[in-house]
Image (cartoon, coloured by chain):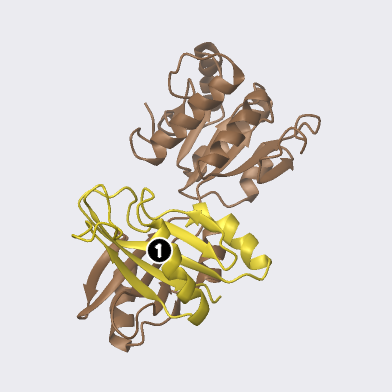
Chain colours: A yellow, B brown
Amino acid sequence: MLDILSDVDRWRADGQRVAVATVIRTVGSSPRPLGSKMAVSGDGGIAGSVSGGCIEGAVIEEAQSVLEDGRPKRLSYGISDELAWSVGLTCGGEVEVLVERIDG
Amino acid sequence: MGFDSLRRSLLAGERVVAFTRADGDELGARMLVWPDGRTEGTLREQELDGTALAIASAETLPATGLREIEGVEVFVETFEPLPQLFVVGAVHVAIHLVHFARQLGFRTVVVDARSAFATAERFPHADELVVEWPADYLARVPLHANTYCVFLTHDEKLDNPALQVALEAGVRYVGALGSSRTHAKRVAALREGGLGQELIDRIHAPIGLDLGGRRPEEIAMAIAAELVAVRNGRQAAGKG
């Protein structure tokens, strides 16, 4: 929370929409603890992190729709399945993230 | 989502517990609870709000994580106030310390009565720069359980009265720069001033983890490392 505060403040002062992703569940080894946050701005700004870099790209993509319609989303990421290119965690853990738009 | 209230409270040094529905149609519904029982927002079920309030009001603050409350999956998150670092003495070591501490997530305030030292030019990274008698300043600002105080002035007239204020306020960390001889002198003065041994023992002196450095930036790094160790519970906040 504190690590994203100054960026979020700046974006909002600029009139941008901002979404925040929070780690709400982890299983096994995961690089970021519960409550870790990443903020995404309408202009593509990024602050903080929710993993060691494995799922950020996917979360940022999902955050776009949250920025648009304001409806929160719960996302789950685990060890990637047979689909070679699906998003997965190399560390072998599982992470769930709640993404929501800041509306005040 | 209650972001503005949360932000305000954390910057003001308040603890907040947030309850957020993590499943179903009401995903994202949130209630914030303050230690004094104040609330904001709702989980959109009266019973759920009531139980959440009880959980937040318990003696032990809830751990951050998912839990089932009244059959509903809720993400509980305890927010500690922003760790704040008061650096007493706008000296050379302080310049580097403020820089490191900022990177480590501390809100930093530099206090010195000597306006020649406490300048914005020397401290571009400080969140606040205060030219005031340190003891007066510390006595009038809120010092909470997540407050860290470092005393670097090398001037006992400035350091000691402020040290006393910090120790009596029960802040998380108190460290004071100086050789063991300087510290012995300081302890004697504080004792004479009526401060109890238990509080005096809480002073981290010599300050900082032993990194073997002597340059100002190395001393600042040692102090910053000690702040992190205390914050993470790897070193007793009460020192020894």
Nearer-the-camera pick, B136 or A57: A57
Nearer-the-camera pick, B128 or A100: A100
Report x, y in % for residue B153.
65, 25
Report x, y in % for residue A1.
47, 57
Determine which quarter of the picture holds residue A38. Answer: bottom left
> Which residue lies most toward the top here?
B181
Residue at figure coordinates x 61%, y 29% from the top left: B96
Nearer-the-camera pick, A96 or B166: A96
SS type, badge 1: helix
Is residue B228 visible in the rendered image? The answer is yes
Nearer-the-camera pick, B51 or B141: B51
Residue at figure coordinates x 51%, y 70% from the top left: B3
Judge the density around disc 1: few (<14), some (14-19), many (≥20) Cα neighbours within 10 Å: many
Quadrant in which the C terminus of chain B appears = top left
Residue at figure coordinates x 22%, y 53% from the top left: A93
Is residue B36 visible in the rendered image? The answer is no
Report x, y in % for residue B172.
45, 42
Residue at figure coordinates x 62%, y 63% from the top left: A11
Q: How many marks?
A: 1
Report x, y in % for residue A81.
19, 60
Determine which quarter of the picture holds residue B216. Answer: top right
Chain that bears disc 1: A
Residue B148 located left or right of residue B44: right
Residue type (three-letter) at the residue carrying disc 1: Val
Residue B237 located left or right of residue A48: left
Above or below, comparing residue B138 to residue A70 in the picture: above
> Which residue lies most toward the front here?
A84
Question: Which residue is under mark 1?
Answer: A59
